[in-house]
Amino acid sequence: MDLRFSDADEAFRAEVKSWLDEHLVGEFAELRGAGGPGREHEGFETRRAWERLLGGHGWIGIGWPSDYGRGCSLMQQVVFHEEYAKAGAPQRVNHMGENLLAPTLLVHGTATQRERFLAPIAAGDELWCQGYSEPGAGSDLANVQTKAVLDGDEWVVTGQKVWTSLAHVADWCFVVARTEPGSTRHSGLSYLLVPMKQPGVDIRPIVQITGTSEFNEVFFDGARTPADHVVGTPGDGWRIAMATLGFERGAATLGQQIGFARELGQVIAVARRRGTLDDPLVRDAVARAWIDLRVLRYTALRMLGPEASDGPLAAAAPSIAKLLWAGWHQRLGELAMMVQGAEATEAPQGADDLDDMQRLFLFSRSDTIYGGSHEIQRDIIARRMLGLPRS
């Protein structure tokens, strides 16, 4: 893959940077760097207003076809996410809608579904969450027990989901549910679009180790959604759900890595200030983190290239990416503790009292679990890329 940006890409970069310079002011500028994992509670309503501003200027869904978005090339999407992260703009509030559901609807949805759901996402008006994991079906997603029964012209959904990010602020949820009685494992599942603000939906926040609550339990007790709010055909939910996961690690990961670089810079600044950068072990760990972050970037670009668009590498690319960045980020959290010494372990009074290094360490413990654990990712690589047997 040619990793150089064209003149057109650089012109687009200038356009993105100019817009951010003009609009990232006032209350939005006060939230530079706010939000993200472990910090989703920060300035949420202002960040939602920022989302609507982005939508009003056509900066949501830039990679969608021109009928629905800007139709930007893959490299232009990379440019946007990198410049957005460099500007320190607030973390986005609708990753699930823009980057997971929308691409799924563009490939597998009906024209009616695309017309109904893409415009509100592009405008920043409707937020989404993901209804996959359950108490007995986390990494083993095929064990889903949530059920949906067709009652006239509506699906009636009953069951429990867990670790549902931002369910407490979401308007809609894409839910994997078992719609064929007696079915097991991958068969008999359907992919439903369910409104969250209705009777029969109970959302209970889960307090995390950081003291914040961006994850939730969601209980469906007779919740309803129209019969035509099934993506694909009933019973084909596993294939659609896997397609959604394939969209999870696209061009936005390049912007994520700019954020990682900023965190690494903060860790280095603390090490310099405290004098721990003089320790050869700390210097070695910092150098390794810097090198590995460059490897992350070039690996991510390679995974977006043509060689990863088909075949065994394409099937395993999302898992390779998740393994690399999650392990790197978790090691960065450990490095953040190392450079501060014993004082880093002093317990604060509450979530708001955590410093950036403590929050980085605590939340990064979950990096190798959520979004598919390391063990599951390695199993996927072994089977889909290396052709190894299941056992």
Image (spheres, rainbow, N blue to C red):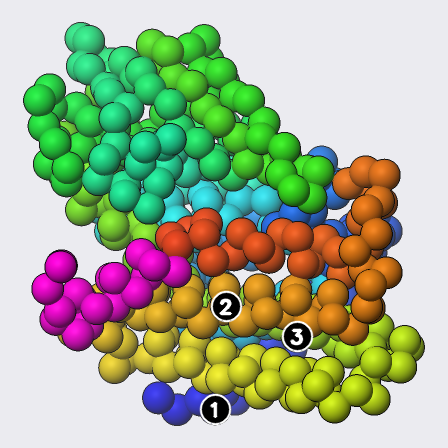
Residue type, label 3:
Ala
Q: Quadrant of the C terminus?
A: bottom left
- Above or below: residue 74 compared with residue 377: below
Give the crowd class for mark 1: few <14, some 14-19, many >=20 residues within 10 Å.
few
Residue at image x 37%, y 11%? 221
Mark 1 against mark 3, which lies toward the viewer? 3
Q: Is residue 376 magenta?
A: yes
Q: Which residue is mark 2?
A: 327
Give the crowd class for mark 2: few <14, some 14-19, many >=20 residues within 10 Å.
some
Q: Which residue is mark 1?
A: 4
Estimate the x, y position of residue 388 in percent, counting from the top left.
13, 69
- Above or below: residue 306 compared with residue 108: below
- For residue 1, say whether it is visible: yes
In screen coordinates, is 26 left or right of 60? right
Give the crowd class for mark 3: few <14, some 14-19, many >=20 residues within 10 Å.
some
Which segment is the magenta one? 374-391
Instruction: State how far apart marks 1 and 3 are (Cα).
Output: 20 Å
Magenta stretch: dominant secondary structure? helix
Q: Is residue 138 magenta?
A: no
Estimate the x, y position of residue 93 in percent, counting from the top left.
59, 44
Lower position in the chain sequence, tag 1 or tag 3: 1
Q: Which residue is mark 3?
A: 261
Estimate the x, y position of residue 95 in percent, counting from the top left.
50, 49
